[in-house]
Image (tube, coloured by chain):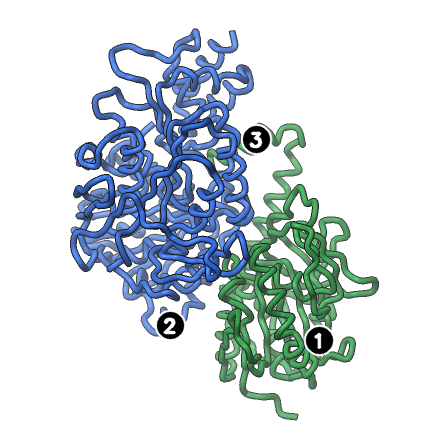
Amino acid sequence: MEPSRRLRIVHLFPDVLRFYGDGGNVRSLVNRAEARGFEASVTPVDVGTDRFPTADLIFIGGGQDREQVTVARELERLGSSLLDQVTDGAALLAVCGGYQNLGTTYRTSLGVDLACLGLFPIATDATGVERRLVGHVLARLDPALATMGAGPLANSPTMLPDPTVIGFENHGGRTVLAPGARSFATVELGHGNNGLDATEGALLLPGDGGIGGLRIGTYLHGPLLPRNPHVADALIAAAVARGGPVATLRPLDDELEWAAHRVGVERMRRIVREDRRIPQWAHRIVDPVRALIGY
Amino acid sequence: MGIGAARMAVNLAALAKHRGTALPGLVGGCIWPDALAHLAGQLDSTVLVIGTNGKTTTAGLISDIVLAGDRAPIANRSGANMRQGILASLLREADLHGRLRRDGPGRRQAVFEVDELALEQILPDLGPAVIVATNLFRDQVDRYGEADAVVDRWTAALAIAKTGTVLVYCADDPRLAMLASGTGSPTITFGLAGPPMDRDHGPDAGGTVGDPVACRTCGRQLEYAWRSIGHLGRFACPEGHVSRTEPDITVESAEPAGRSRGIRIGGRFGEGSARSLDDGLTGAYNVAAALAVGVALGQTIGQGCEAIEGSTGPFGRLESLQIDGRHMVLALIKNTVSLAETVQMSSMWAADVVLLGLNDAPADGRDISWIWDAPIASLLAGRAVVLTGSRSTDLRLRLKYDRDLATSPPRSIEQAETLVTALDLALALTPPGGTMVVAATYTAMMGLRAIVERRGDASPVPR
């Protein structure tokens, strides 16, 4: 089957889920699809929308606790349409709050269990959290994503065979993957799903569990896609394939994207190296001074 | 002993010409833990300024207002707004016995700007007469967490404020209105007289700049009749739990188009006219906040307006300088809203060159995602753009993906490795008599400002 020349992006609840910069993900998808000659469109689905538009790629971002309660209520209404579309081959990217909302269970910081769709095999608990997981993340992308189909990642040979993904995480909830479930990436620096098992996000390949669409759930902001163009391309390639064979996308001039990616990787490694040089007890003195002089 | 040692730390820091004005406070607080309570107890009245944007500017205006008739208030004007910075400002005014110096007549007053997370640590010791909340935008989420979390912390802090502390807040900010409704404190509010005239102010205006704000009672999203900056505006909960109340002190542009710095003050405490320190709504809000504090301290609107006549803004906050025969405007950017307001005001600046500095040190906020949320095309289109800072490559990428810049691009885009080369490049690109706009995050601004100062063309950083 000839892949579609259209990319219909549906942005879920941008009116309430628009944590720091997640809109940049949509811009990345549109620009990169158009550069390949696809006709890209973005349809926002605001709270209160009664019909779920047809989608090739669905994006849901992050928000605050109160907004996530609103989203859970909306998903009770629109969830079955969302599930149908992803089953039918639409790709899905869920970041932070949206990732938590689309898991199997989600208990908010107030101890409320929110209704979840189960698109990701994850359980998230945000109760009794004393410390949010905040900071830069450097992780290794799951090789299955790198080699998916003909491999859209073939466009970035410098990243193979061990491609990195970078971002900034900021979440209270601790997420645990179901046994045997695949993570989006393996944490090298940072916290990831829970700060304990080195998993970051969740990844379900087209066809997993009888669902045709590629599903990526992650805690990585930054925004994620501009600095990780290989992930953007994987989503676009899977979305236009609609569950069929994933074709390679034409390479783009990604010099700037990879430059920003490298800056991220280098800065993270440097920050961690410096932190390791400072003994734990000295942080109480060093950190405020560093904050003052801006270093 | 501890008192003297803490005071000595101030002298040593001054000798070492240490710019970070909080260091002596850090040392002093370690060797004399009760220093803050002891020194603050000697003050006749204290004003605390909290909020995301405009703290430093508003605190400066308040200092000018409380100055009238008295000696200059003790202040942390260079932005050292954590507990140790406030302590350092008090230590500088103390003698070796731990007494605030009282040479000459007048009451000893203090005006402190306070970091979002420091309020709860200092409130019990300071016992302020007035707390003024300017606004609460999404900012440095890596440090503060969600904006709702800041509201929770402030609510807890205000619960332990001494009886009679007046809470002055912006009536247009629903987060602050919900905060105020949870306290028993007497309040005085300020806000716009009506919808702003300098921008599209419809219910959906602002795009991704304004945060979604939910009613804290029912969780439903607030609805707006009009918007001003970000989530500020005329708001109401659809179920009626909370809505904007008419401000006690109103402010509006003296000219219908909003294109002048003249502003008109109205409301139930009387009328007046003043000049804003900047070309935008932020300046009008800051003046109204300062006048409201003046009212809370027993002054009239007229006295307040007179006191701030001729006030100058703090360094790096929309400061205007002359350098090498070129005009330079410095704008501090630190979050989506401050970037969006800088872009909004830039339509009045006729800039030839724009220098953007983006650092991601802790004092800047390590998460720089906010650069993606503000529309910046109108600031850059057709102009020479110089990018610098530790994350300038991210800025460059942000510009590449901007759809508006794709149709009307900048004249040129260059990246400079260091602040010095960036400044030199930007100056070289600006024709004599021309204007360059510098928009930079905190540490980048401090760095650029220091370079300009070293070259001898600007007034020194206030201490």
> Which of A46 and B11 lies nearest the eye of the viewer?
A46
* Residue toward you, A129 or B24: A129
Which colour represents chain A? Answer: green
Query: Do circles 3 and 2 both sit on a common chain?
Result: no
Q: Is residue A290 visible?
A: yes
Q: Looking at the image, is A256 positioned above or below residue A9?
A: above
Q: Position of residue B431 (x, y in %)?
A: 20, 54
Q: Is residue A257 left or right of residue B313?
A: right
Chain letter for blue, please: B
Residue pictured at 27% horizontal, 23% vertical = B72
Q: Residues within 10 Å of mark 1 (few under 14, many from 20)?
A: many
**Residue named by callout 2:** B406
Q: Amino acid at mark 3?
A: Val
Query: Residue A227's quadrant in the figure?
Result: bottom right
Query: Mark 1: which amino acid?
Result: Met
Q: Which residue is mark 3?
A: A286
Residue A285 rendering spot, x and y as whole percentages: 57, 28
Task: Indicate which disc, 1 or 3, sits on the residue closer to the N terminus.
Answer: 1
Residue designated by label 1: A148
Q: Please state the horizontal and vertical placement of residue A205, each as a whole percent of the image.
A: 73, 74
Q: Residues within 10 Å of mark 3 (few under 14, many from 20)?
A: few
Q: Could you give the CA–CA distance between mark 3 and mark 2, rounded to whole angstroms?
A: 44 Å
- Residue B39 at x, y = what percent? 43, 16
Question: In the picture shown, does residue B277 fall above or below A43?
Answer: above
The chain ID associated with circle 3 is A
The residue at 70%/58% (across/down) is: A113
Q: Are marks 1 and 2 on the same chain?
A: no
In this view, the residue farthest toward the front is: B240
Using the rendered image, report if marks 1 and 3 lie on a common chain: yes
What's the distance in space between the residues labelled 1 and 2, CA to CA?
32 Å
* Subunit under mark 1: A
